[in-house]
Amino acid sequence: MSLLFLPVEAAAQGATILGRVGDVDSGRALVTVEVRLRGTARTAVTDADGRFRLTGVMAGTWWLEFRMLGYEERADSVTVGPDDAEVEVDVRLATRPVELDPMTVTVRVGAIAAWLASRGFPQRRAEARSLLHATHDEIRHTAARNLNELIQRVPAVRIRRFADGRVEVWLEPSPLPDGQPCRVAVYLNGAAVELGRFDWTGIRGRASRPLRFDDVVALGDIDGIELYGPGESPVASERGCGSLLVWNSMLRPQLDEEFTGAVRGVVVNDSTGAVMGGVKIRLRPGGLEVVTDAAGRFEFPALLPGDYEIQAEYPGAEPWRGAVKVKAFGVIDVELRLES
C-alpha cells in the first residue's frame, strides 16, 4: 500500500493534490471516500471514478486522511515542493468489518434496509448507474454539513438559486441537444418536491423565505439518497435530465408514494392483424405471468424500476421475446406481433 508522488509543472498559488482511491484487493474505484487535509478544514469526496482534488495546497509536508464506512481508516504523508503545481497520489484501502449492536442498531438497520429494498434501492446500487448512491452511515462519513453541500460535491451537478426563492438542481454543462437548462427532478419517498418560496407564521407575524432542502428533510434523517444523470434515471421524466431520490422511512405514510411503473400492451397476429386472446405473457425477473384477454390486452402493474424481459407464447405461433426498461411513475405500452 504505497503512495505514488508525481510532481509536475509549478503553480503560482499553491499546488493541487490529485488522487484516486481504490480497493486494495480488487483495485476498483471507491466512491464517496472522505479525504481530509489534516490540520485544516479542507476536505474532498471521491467521485464515480474514485478520484478527488484538493487545490491551493501550499508547499510543505502534509498528512492526507482517508475514511469510508467498511474500510480501514488511513493516513499518509505527502510532500508538496515549492515548484510543484500538481502532486498525484494513488491510494488503496483495505476492508474492515463493521460491528453493529445486535440488540439495537441491527434491528433498526434491518428494518430500514428492508424498506429501502422494497423501493429497489440496493438493486439500483448494484447496477452502478448513479452519480451518488449512499446510505445514512455513508452520508454521515462524508462530513457534509447539509444536503446542499453533499449534492454540490458531485461533479457536473450544481444547485441554482433564483431571485424568487426557487432552488433547483441543474446539470452543467447541459446534456440536452439544444443546450437548454437541464433541471434534475427531486423526489422524496417518490413524491415530487418543488423547492420555491413558502409562507410561514411565527410570533412576529407572517413572513416568506426560500424553501431549502433541509426544510424538507434534514441530512441526518436521510436513510438513502440517489442521484442520476440523463438516461440512467429510474424515474420517468419528459426531458430526461436525471433525478434526485431522497428516502426517509420515518415519513411514512404521509409521503411514501408507490415508486413503481407498469408495462401494458396488446398481442396481434402478424399476418392478419387480429388481436389474440389467451396468449401467455411472462415477465422476468420476477416470474410474473398473465394471459391476454379477449381484446388481446395484458398488463403488469406495480413494477419496480429496472430492466425486464417479456416473453409471449401461444400454441402454433413462434415465441416472442423483447426487453423493456421500467421507470417509476411511467407506463410502457408495447405491441407484440406473433407469427403463426
Image: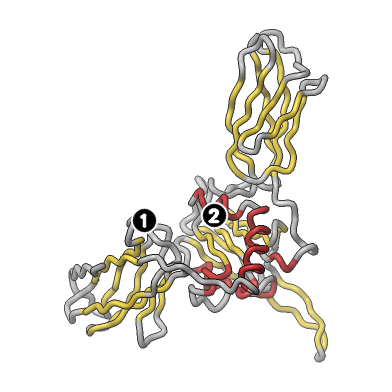
Secondary structure beneath label 1: loop
Q: Give the quarter of the image for residue 70.
A: bottom left
Vertically, is 75 above or below 180?
Answer: below
Q: What amino acid is at disc 1?
A: Arg
Secondary structure beneath label 2: strand
Vertically, is 141 above or below 184?
Answer: below
In the image, what residue occupies the spot 54% across and 48% down?
232
- Image location of residue 275, percent across then percent down: 76, 16
In the image, what residue occupies the spot 23% across and 69% down?
2
Please indicate, yes or no, whether residue 179 appears anywhere in the rendered image: no
Vertically, is 71 above or below 29?
Answer: below
Q: What amino acid is at disc 2?
A: Tyr
Q: Earlier in the sequence, mark 1 or mark 2?
A: 1
Query: In the picture, which quadrant includes the N terminus?
Result: bottom left
The colour scheme used to paint the residues is secondary structure
Q: Please give the residue where the numbered disc 2 appears in the rendered image.
A: 228
Task: Judge depth for marks 1 and 2 and give the one in front.
Answer: 1
> How many discs mark residues in the rendered view?
2
**CB within 8 Å, label 1 to label 2:** no
Instruction: Find residue 28 and name its label.
Output: 1
In space, the residues marked 1 and 2 are separated at their CA atoms by 21 Å
- Image location of residue 300, percent across then percent down: 73, 35
Vertically, is 332 above or below 26?
Answer: above
How many neighbours does mark 2 have within 10 angstroms: few (below 14), some (14-19), or many (20 or more)? many
Foreground of the two, 73 or 310: 73
* Residue 274 falls left or right of residue 112: right
Q: Give the quarter of the image for residue 90.
A: bottom left
In the image, what residue occupies the spot 62% across and 67% down?
109
- Image location of residue 247, percent across then percent down: 65, 63
Foreground of the two, 106 or 295: 106
- Image location of residue 340, percent across then percent down: 65, 9
Please indicate, yes or no, whether residue 182 appears anywhere in the rendered image: yes
